Image (tube, grey):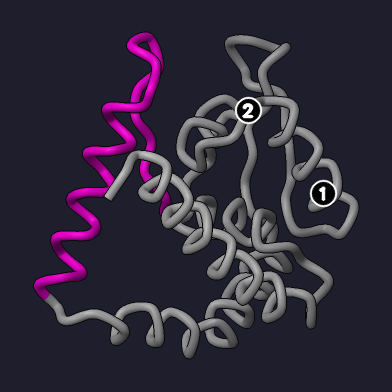
């Protein structure tokens, strides 16, 4: 397999998953990327916008744009960080948690398809390989991020 084939295979797999996730999330007017934001915040943590961007692997402008939309819908709340008034802390609202739980249940079939498409040992190997690729492709000054 060539480097090009590897890159294209990764891209096609990502796009297939993204399209399927978008289709499920569209029922609630949420994009797959916005769902990832909700998922990252669903663990009950309050993160800065920068921390959120690192966690989900998105740049600050993309994160800000998604947060503005999610805040307008009442799913997230952004507040100034006490020690740095320029920084914003982000948390799910009650409505955001409820919406996330509903969407998580609706997307369960898709996650199960993803997991059952490979044998358990293949899944573990794939996750390990994807983490290695992420680490090797990440700039030296940026920590590798993993999806929630």
Q: Is residue 145 above or below residue 110?
A: above
Mark 1 sits on what residue?
Answer: 71
Q: Quadrant of residue 78?
A: top right
Count of number-bearing discs: 2
Q: Quadrant of residue 36?
A: bottom right
Residue 70 x/y as whole percent: 79, 52
Magenta stretch bounds: 121-148
**Mark 1–mark 2 CB contact (< 8 Å):** no
Residue 103 x/y as whole percent: 62, 78
Q: Nearer the viewer, mark 1 or mark 2?
A: 2
Q: Nearer the viewer, residue 101 or 147?
A: 147
Element marked by disc 1: helix
Category of crowding for the residue at label 1, using alpha-carbon neighbours closer than 10 angstroms: few (below 14), some (14–19), many (at least 20): some
Q: Is residue 34 above or below residue 59?
A: below
* Gap between marks 1 and 2 measured at Cα: 18 Å
Check residue 94 in the rendering and tell me which mark sits there, or answer none.
Answer: none
Mark 2 sits on what residue?
Answer: 59
Category of crowding for the residue at label 2, using alpha-carbon neighbours closer than 10 angstroms: few (below 14), some (14–19), many (at least 20): few
- Earlier sequence position, callout 1 versus callout 2: 2
**Magenta highlight on residue 133:** yes
Q: Nearer the viewer, residue 126 or 87?
A: 126
Q: Quadrant of residue 139?
A: top left
The C terminus: image quadrant: bottom left
Element marked by disc 2: loop
Residue 9 x/y as whole percent: 43, 57
Residue 98 x/y as whole percent: 65, 75
Q: Is 11 left or right of 80, judged from the image as shown?
A: left
Q: Is residue 95 above or below residue 67?
A: below
Q: Residue at x 38, y 86 (%)?
A: 112
Q: Residue at x 27, y 27 (%)?
A: 136
Q: Is residue 61 above or below residue 77?
A: above
């Amino acid at each position: 397999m060539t480097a090009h084939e590897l890159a294209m295979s990764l891209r096609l797999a990502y796009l297939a998953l993204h399209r399927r996730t978008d289709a499920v999330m569209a029922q609630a007017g949420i994009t797959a990327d916005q769902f990832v934001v909700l998922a990252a915040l669903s663990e009950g943590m309050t993160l800065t916008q920068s921390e959120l961007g690192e966690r989900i692997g998105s740049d600050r402008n993309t994160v800000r744009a998604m947060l503005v939309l999610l805040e307008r819908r009442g799913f997230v709340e952004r507040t100034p960080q006490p020690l740095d008034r320029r920084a914003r802390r982000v948390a799910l609202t009650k409505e955001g948690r409820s919406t996330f739980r509903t969407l998580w249940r609706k997307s369960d079939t898709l996650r199960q398809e993803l997991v059952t498409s490979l044998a358990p040992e293949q899944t573990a190997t794939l996750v390990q390989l994807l983490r290695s690729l992420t680490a090797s492709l990440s700039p030296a000054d940026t920590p590798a991020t993993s999806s929630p």
